[in-house]
Image (cartoon, rainbow, N blue to C red):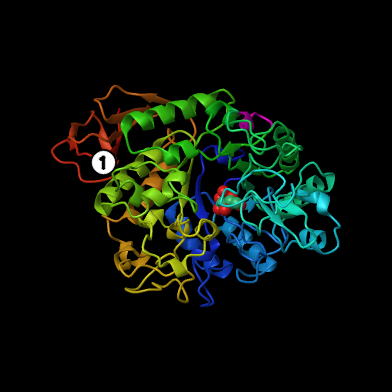
């Protein structure tokens, strides 16, 4: 971790830890900070630059920690504030930066403000409390997790929650809310945290009239999405971050369909980067990927911001499974129809290997979601009673929810819990023995070996990470591009083998036969 690297987010490889499922040190079946501390060597050897932690705060876990009861502490199931400090310091010593999740759109029903709001009425104006329309909620908004976006308290008023009823939305028009979060940012930055991932970053501001949803209005801006007030908020946070001598990154979870509206959040004095969901959801098709890459690069160029490249996270179907289906794209709305659609995991794995080479070669920063380096598929066979995601509950089980990508990691051994710790909070599949870290270590054909090798190359090759790219002529169904320093990446998404350009192979996602690149295979080459 070089202190001279003042713009590290422009090129970093960032590993997402979902703390409940990474490693459990005390045998209670839930991952914890001591489990992470015990595996920092693994992360260093994987070759990542930073860790992004999904929320680690005290929480009743209505949404697995995205319902925060206290933004300045650690949930006892994960550890203590002192352990978080030790983890930050040890990660730094291992050359790894720390990004934490900040959840500004909503708190928890257990947050002190909300408890007071319900019991005494104090602080109601820090949330969105309203009278109903007769017996009906104040407006027609629906929760993103299903069902109405309003819940009624005992005295008859309703509060707004865009997600679960356990996640009351905060009112960002209230100065106390803004001041509170300024202080929370400083609290963690003072402890050495190197950046924040801002949850639901485009939804935080609401139209104060809270009007009914107008289906005829353009999708963005929206009464609760992409409102102009947000830009002032992120400029303010940027000033807080920039006041530190060490570089602190602001990274937003910005779900917007329009790439130019998305880029507005990345102006020079706002967020440094935002997640590229267009790429994540893109089908495994050359034309679609090329369009997505071109639009991403063009939109980011308008503001001089670095692109991000993401294949999976804790909210989406794991890409080994997606890429093994007839329909390879991802959309939340389609999860319920695609769930259990037949998936050829050998094909999905081949494509996931090629996708890693594509992703790591593109200009900007990359994200690795825990377990993707092991090639984990979605755990689709979780019994309904084991599922914990509020999406599953709020849709009456119609949508399976996101538990299938959150199953505890397999570290070693031949049966569950595969060295995770105690029997996991979600059951692990019986057939993951070959997918453990121990089973893959030292196996040159493993996903782990591919990730370690290509992340190391990505670090060492000066043309990778931030910088320009240039498309090369290629046959239909093939993506080929050049980066500085004579680096070339070729990905064959066509059904036929294609010839390789001149150059010395540096890495390949699968065997190259007779100078040809087989289908669903990618190669990195260096040319003189
Ligand atoms: C984000 C998180 C997701 C969470 C939601 C509400 O989309 O990634 O896991 O459920 O926000 O906080």
Q: Is residue 410 visible?
A: yes
Q: Nearer the viewer, residue 409 or 155?
A: 155
Q: Residue furthest left?
A: 514
User: Which residue sits at x=71%, y=39%?
Assistant: 206
User: Which residue sits at x=43%, y=66%?
Assistant: 384
Magenta part of the chain: 264-269
Disc count in the image?
1
Quarter of the image where one finds residue 139: top right
Q: Residue furthest front?
A: 134
Q: Element type at marker 1?
A: strand
The percent coordinates of residue 93 (x first, y second) are 58, 58
Q: Nearer the viewer, residue 383 or 368?
A: 383
Q: Residues within 10 Å of mark 1 (few under 14, many from 20)?
A: many
Q: Quadrant of the C terminus?
A: top left
Q: Is 426 covered by the magenta stretch?
A: no
Q: Nearer the viewer, residue 184 or 458?
A: 184
Residue topped by disc 1: 521
Relative horizontal placement of residue 200, taking residue 292 as reference (left or right)? right
Q: Is residue 52 visible?
A: no
The percent coordinates of residue 272 (x first, y second) are 61, 36
Relative horizontal placement of residue 365, taking residue 273 as reference (left or right)? left
Relative horizontal placement of residue 505, taking residue 6 as reference (left or right)? left
Check the image and report above or below for 115 versus 217: below
The percent coordinates of residue 107 (x first, y second) are 70, 55
Check the image and report above or below for 293 versus 76: above
Q: Is mark 1 within 8 Å of ligand 1?
A: no
The percent coordinates of residue 521 (x first, y second) are 26, 41
User: Which residue sits at x=53%, y=29%?
Assistant: 259
Check the image and report above or below for 386 versus 397: below
Quarter of the image where one finds residue 110: bottom right
């Amino acid at each position: 971790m070089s202190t001279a690297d003042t713009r590290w987010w422009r090129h970093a490889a960032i590993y997402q830890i979902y703390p409940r499922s990474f490693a459990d040190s005390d045998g209670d079946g839930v991952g914890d900070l001591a489990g992470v501390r015990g595996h920092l060597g693994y992360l260093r050897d994987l070759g990542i630059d930073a860790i992004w932690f999904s929320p680690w705060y005290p929480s009743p876990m209505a949404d697995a920690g995205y319902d925060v009861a206290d933004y300045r502490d650690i949930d006892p199931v994960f550890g203590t504030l002192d352990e978080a400090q030790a983890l930050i310091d040890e990660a730094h010593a291992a050359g790894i930066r720390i990004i934490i999740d900040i959840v500004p759109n909503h708190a928890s029903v257990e947050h002190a403000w909300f408890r007071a709001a319900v019991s005494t009425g104090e602080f109601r104006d820090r949330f969105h409390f309203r009278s109903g329309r007769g017996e009906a909620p104040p407006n027609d908004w629906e929760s993103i997790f299903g069902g109405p976006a309003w819940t009624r308290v005992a005295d008859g008023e309703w509060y707004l929650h865009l997600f679960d009823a356990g996640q009351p939305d905060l009112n960002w028009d209230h100065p106390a809310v803004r001041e509170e979060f300024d202080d929370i940012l400083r609290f963690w930055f003072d402890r050495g945290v190197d950046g924040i991932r801002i949850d639901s970053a485009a939804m935080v501001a609401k139209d104060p009239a809270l009007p009914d949803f107008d289906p005829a209005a353009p999708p963005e801006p929206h009464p609760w999405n992409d409102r102009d007030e947000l830009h002032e908020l992120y400029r303010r946070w940027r000033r807080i971050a920039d006041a530190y001598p060490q570089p602190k990154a602001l990274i937003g979870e910005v779900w917007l369909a329009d790439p130019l509206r998305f880029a507005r959040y990345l102006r020079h004095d706002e967020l440094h980067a935002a997640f590229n969901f267009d790429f994540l959801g893109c089908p495994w098709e050359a034309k679609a990927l090329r369009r997505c890459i071109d639009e991403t690069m063009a939109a980011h160029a308008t503001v001089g911001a670095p692109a991000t490249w993401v294949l999976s996270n804790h909210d989406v179907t794991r890409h080994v499974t997606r890429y093994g289906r007839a329909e390879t794209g991802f959309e939340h709305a389609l999860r319920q129809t695609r769930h259990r659609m037949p998936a050829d995991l050998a094909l999905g794995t081949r494509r996931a290997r090629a996708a890693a080479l594509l992703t790591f070669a593109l200009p900007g920063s990359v994200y690795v979601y825990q377990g993707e380096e092991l090639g984990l598929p979605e755990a689709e066979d979780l019994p309904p009673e084991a599922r914990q995601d509020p999406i599953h509950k709020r849709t009456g089980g119609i949508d399976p929810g996101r538990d299938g990508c959150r199953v505890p990691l397999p570290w070693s051994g031949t049966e569950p819990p595969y060295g995770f710790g105690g029997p996991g909070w979600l059951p692990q599949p019986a057939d993951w023995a070959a997918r453990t870290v121990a089973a893959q270590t030292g196996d040159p054909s493993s996903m782990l070996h591919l990730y370690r090798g290509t992340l190391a190359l990505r670090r060492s090759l000066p043309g990778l990470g931030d910088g320009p790219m240039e498309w090369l002529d290629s046959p239909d169904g093939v993506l080929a591009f050049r980066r500085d320093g004579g680096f070339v990446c070729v990905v064959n998404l066509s059904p036929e083998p294609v010839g390789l350009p001149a150059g010395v192979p540096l890495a390949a996602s699968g065997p190259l036969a007779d100078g040809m690149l087989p289908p669903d295979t990618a190669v990195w080459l260096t040319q003189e």
